[in-house]
Image (cartoon, rainbow, N blue to C red):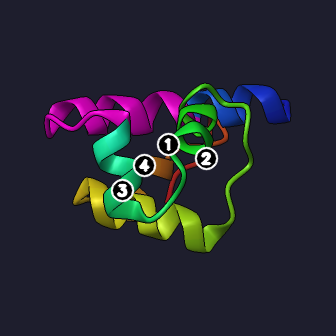
């Protein structure tokens, strides 16, 4: 699995979780302490986030990092 595919999957999962709790990109970016345009790039799979930024995003999403990353890359499981 290549980097673009991995980042795309991560971004998709973040977007699904964000929408499930009813936040806009702007609202989530504000809560997570990241720029809205940066966050948009994360959701589109264009940015490789650091672990600390991923932790802040997951805190804002009210979920564990493990919930968002489980099985990435495809075929991996805990």
Q: Earlier in the sequence, mark 4 or mark 2?
A: 4
Residue furthest right as drawn? 2
Q: Is residue 63 above or below residue 5?
A: below
Q: Earlier in the sequence, mark 2 or mark 1?
A: 1
Nearer mark to the viewer, of 2 and 1: 1
Q: CA distance from mark 1 to mark 3?
A: 7 Å
Q: Answer with left or right where residue 69 lies relative to residue 28.
A: right
| Callouts 4 and 2 close, C-beta under 8 Å | no
Quick one: SS at disc 3? helix
Residue placed under numbered mark 1 in the picture: 36
Label 1 vs 3, first from the N-terminus: 3
State how far apart marks 2 and 1 are (Cα): 30 Å
> Residue 31: percent from the left, percent from the top?
31, 61
Does the magenta segment cover residue 6?
no
Which residue lies under the disc numbered 4?
68
Rendering coords of residue 17 (x, y %): 28, 38
Q: Quadrant of residue 37?
A: top right
x, y percent for residue 18: 28, 38
Crowd around label 2: few <14 · some 14–19 · many ≥20 (10 Å): few
Quarter residue 59 falls in: bottom left
Whole-angstrom CA distance, mark 2 to mark 3, is: 32 Å
Query: How far apart, in angstroms, are the residues tagged by discs 4 and 2?
Result: 13 Å
Contact, mark 1 vs mark 3 (Cβ under 8 Å): yes
Mark 2 vs mark 3: which is more N-terminal? 3
Residue occupied by mark 3: 30
Q: Which residues are magenta?
A: 10-25
Q: Are marks 4 and 3 in contact (CB under 8 Å)?
A: no
Residue denoted by label 2: 76
Label 2: which secondary element: loop
Residue at image position (56%, 66%) is 53
């Amino acid at each position: 699995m290549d980097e673009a595919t991995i980042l795309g999957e991560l971004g998709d999962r973040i977007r699904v979780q964000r929408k499930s709790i009813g936040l806009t990109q702007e609202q989530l970016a504000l809560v997570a302490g990241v720029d809205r345009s940066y966050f948009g790039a994360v959701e589109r799979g264009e940015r490789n986030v650091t672990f600390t930024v991923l932790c802040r995003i997951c805190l804002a999403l009210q979920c564990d990092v493990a919930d968002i990353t489980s099985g990435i890359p495809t075929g991996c499981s805990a």
